């Protein structure tokens, strides 16, 4: 067996160069994968932020609607329901804001119509 070729400096340099090229290729592939993951995370973050903004605006709207029902604590639920109806709110919105069943709101509104 001839193993002198292993001890040849040219063979060692070629082997070292190939090893460095493989390491460089691995490094570049890892950097590309990191960039892809970052891009994916940025897209996800943007979608979550937009969903959070939409939920925040919806929550603000709901708070405003509930605030009109709870603005005057001295009013009874009936008075609050009638006030909200005069403001143009639907029966569903009134029921949600006052936390009473829809049929109870309908009954209050029908009684008010009958009394007038």
Image (cartoon, rainbow, N blue to C red):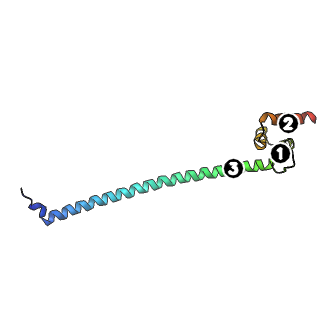
Say left or right for 23 vs 93: left
Sequence-wise, the earlier of marks 1 and 2 is 1
Q: Nearer the viewer, mark 3 or mark 1?
A: 3
Identify the image quadrant of the C terminus.
top right
Q: Position of residue 46 (x, y in %)?
A: 55, 53
Sequence-wise, the earlier of marks 2 and 3 is 3
Along the viewing direction, whichever of 20 and 3 lies nearer the viewer: 3
Q: Name the residue under label 3.
A: 59
Q: Where is residue 31 in the image (x, y as percent from the top left)?
A: 38, 58
What kind of element bears circle 1?
loop
Q: Residue at x 82, y 51 (%)?
A: 71
Q: Is residue 49 above or below residue 89?
A: below
What kind of element bears circle 2?
helix
Q: Mark 2 points at which residue?
A: 108
Q: Position of residue 56 (x, y in %)?
A: 66, 52
Along the viewing direction, whichever of 94 and 87 lies nearer the viewer: 94
């Amino acid at each position: 067996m001839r193993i002198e070729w292993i001890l040849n400096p040219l063979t060692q340099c070629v082997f070292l160069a190939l090893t460095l090229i493989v390491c460089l290729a691995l490094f570049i592939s890892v950097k590309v994968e990191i960039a892809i993951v970052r891009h994916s995370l940025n897209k996800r973050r943007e979608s979550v932020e937009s969903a959070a903004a939409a939920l925040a605006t919806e929550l603000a709207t709901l708070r405003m609607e509930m605030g009109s029902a709870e603005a005057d604590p001295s009013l009874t639920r009936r008075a609050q329901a009638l006030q909200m109806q005069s403001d143009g709110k639907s029966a569903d919105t009134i029921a949600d804001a006052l936390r009473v069943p829809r049929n109870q709101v309908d009954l209050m509104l029908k009684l008010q119509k009958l009394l007038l």
